[in-house]
Image (cartoon, rainbow, N blue to C red):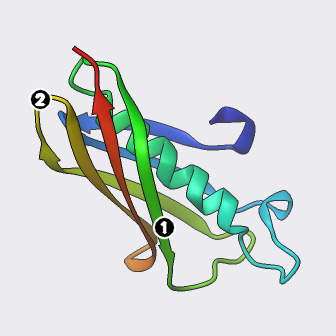
Amino acid sequence: MSTLGLEGEILGPGRARVWGVVRPEHLNLHGTAHGGFLYTLADAAFALASNSHGVRAVALSTRMEYFRPVQAGEPVEAIAEEIHRGNRTALYQVEVRRGEELVALFTGWVYRFS
């Protein structure tokens, strides 16, 4: 995460936050934040949240919806929340925000090892 200028924290069991500022090297050919950068931001929050219970968890599937472009210099954050947790799988939703504005939505399933 640090290579991309991102920082993160576990907010509690099943919850995490990752944040950073969009830098020029994060831009796509249109001059806005590359979808891969925003995906990485969300995926990092997903990983922190899903592993916050002390049980190793790995991604099974993910999905990302993009709503608004983000410009260089703008701060972004991803807040991950556990939606469902079973014995072997769990579902997480991650909101990617620029301030109060929702710019993307990520959902992901994990497999939880015993």
Seen from the viewer's position, the closer of residues 92 and 110 is: 110
Left or right of 37 in this view: 43:
left
Residue 101, x across and y down, in percent: 41, 81
Residue designated by label 2: 87
Tally of numbered tags: 2
Residue 92, x across and y down, in percent: 28, 51
Residue 64: mark in rendering: 1
| The quarter of the displayed image where residue 94 is located | bottom left
Where's the C terminus, which quadrant? top left
Residue located at (28% from left, 19% from top): 113
| The quarter of the displayed image where residue 70 is located | bottom right
For disc 1, the neighbor class at 10 Å (few under 14, some 14 to 19, many from 20) is: some
Left or right of 58 in this view: 69:
right
Residue located at (70% from left, 77% from top): 71
Is 8 rendered above or below residue 68? above
- Find the distance from the CA under tag 1 to the CA under tag 2: 25 Å
Label 1 is placed on what type of residue?
Met
- Tell me the element at label 1: strand
Residue located at (41% from left, 78% from top): 102
Where's the N terminus, which quadrant? top right
Sooner in the amino-acid sequence: mark 1 or mark 2: 1
Residue 51, x across and y down, in percent: 32, 27
- Tell me the element at label 2: loop
For disc 2, the neighbor class at 10 Å (few under 14, some 14 to 19, many from 20) is: few
| The quarter of the displayed image where residue 4 is located | top right
Q: Mark 1 or mark 2: which is in front?
A: 2
Residue 75: mark in rendering: none
Seen from the viewer's position, the closer of residues 101 and 108 is: 108
